[in-house]
Image (spheres, rainbow, N blue to C red):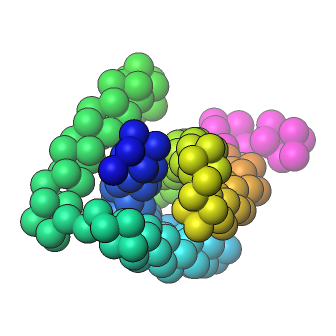
């Protein structure tokens, strides 16, 4: 296997780990979200994310690099641990100022975290697509481009929900609701 193929496999494995981690996060965030558009969008993307993981796993198999489930789970655990630690360190200064909020604030924070995760996935798929194109692996490049489009669409949906979620937090927590009404 040449170094280009190895790099494609490395980024496919990264994308696979990210998708598996997102499945768990989206399940949790779907459970916490109130009924409505955000919950619907999260559930839809959860279905897409499971499909993404399956497609990436299939592509790894086609390239002759399919590890046993145990090996994948151990690798995923390592990647999740590193990602979780990185996110925790990055969010620590913000969390100090966040305090504890109500359900609306939890939904807002989850949406913000989901948007950040989508950005990370988009970056991964941009890199994977470019690497695959660079070595002439059209099938992987097309897969990365297709999944990237789904991730971009979800990021756009999350961005559409952020003002509504922010307004909900303002209305439930701001001392002077009249000021919020005048600003709206």
> Quick check: 76 above or below 79?
below
Left-right relation of 37 to 125: right
In the picture shown, does residue 144 fall above or below 30? above
Q: Position of residue 130 (x, y in %)?
A: 63, 44
Observer-nearest of 80 and 103: 80
Q: Nearer the viewer, residue 158 or 5?
A: 5
Residue appearing at x 59%, y 67% in the figure = 139
Q: Residue at x 41, y 25 (%)?
A: 90
Query: Is residue 154 or residue 74 the one in the foreground?
Result: 74
Q: Which residues are magenta?
A: 168-184
- Verify whether residue 174 appears in magenta: yes
Q: Position of residue 63 (x, y in %)?
A: 38, 66
Return the x and y of residue 123 as percentages of the image width and height.
Answer: 58, 42
Q: Nearer the viewer, residue 149 or 104?
A: 149
Q: Quadrant of residue 153?
A: bottom right
Point 71% across, 37% down: residue: 176
Residue 122 visible = no
Residue 26 visible at all: yes
What residue sits 46% from the left and 43% below the top? 4
Q: What secondary structure characterizes most of the magenta part? A: helix
Q: Is residue 124 above or below residue 86?
A: below
Q: Position of residue 156 (x, y in %)?
A: 73, 56
Q: Along the horizontal axis of the image, is 133 left or right of 57?
A: right
State yes or no: residue 37 in magenta.
no
């Amino acid at each position: 296997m040449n170094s280009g193929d190895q790099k494609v496999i490395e980024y496919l494995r990264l994308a696979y780990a990210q998708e598996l981690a997102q499945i768990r996060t989206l399940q949790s965030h779907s459970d916490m979200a109130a009924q409505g558009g955000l919950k619907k969008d999260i559930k839809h993307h959860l279905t897409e994310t499971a499909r993404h993981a399956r497609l990436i796993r299939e592509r790894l198999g086609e390239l002759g690099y399919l590890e046993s489930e145990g090996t994948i789970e151990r690798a995923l655990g390592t990647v999740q641990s590193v990602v979780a630690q990185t996110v925790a360190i990055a969010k620590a200064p913000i969390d100090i100022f966040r305090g504890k909020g109500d359900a609306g604030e939890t939904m807002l924070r989850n949406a913000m975290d989901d948007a950040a995760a989508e950005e990370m996935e988009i970056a991964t798929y941009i890199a994977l697509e470019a690497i695959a194109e660079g070595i002439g692996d059209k099938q992987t490049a097309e897969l990365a481009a297709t999944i990237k489009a789904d991730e971009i669409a979800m990021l756009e949906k999350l961005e559409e929900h952020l003002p509504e979620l922010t307004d909900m937090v303002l209305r439930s927590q701001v001392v002077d609701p009249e000021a919020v009404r005048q600003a709206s």
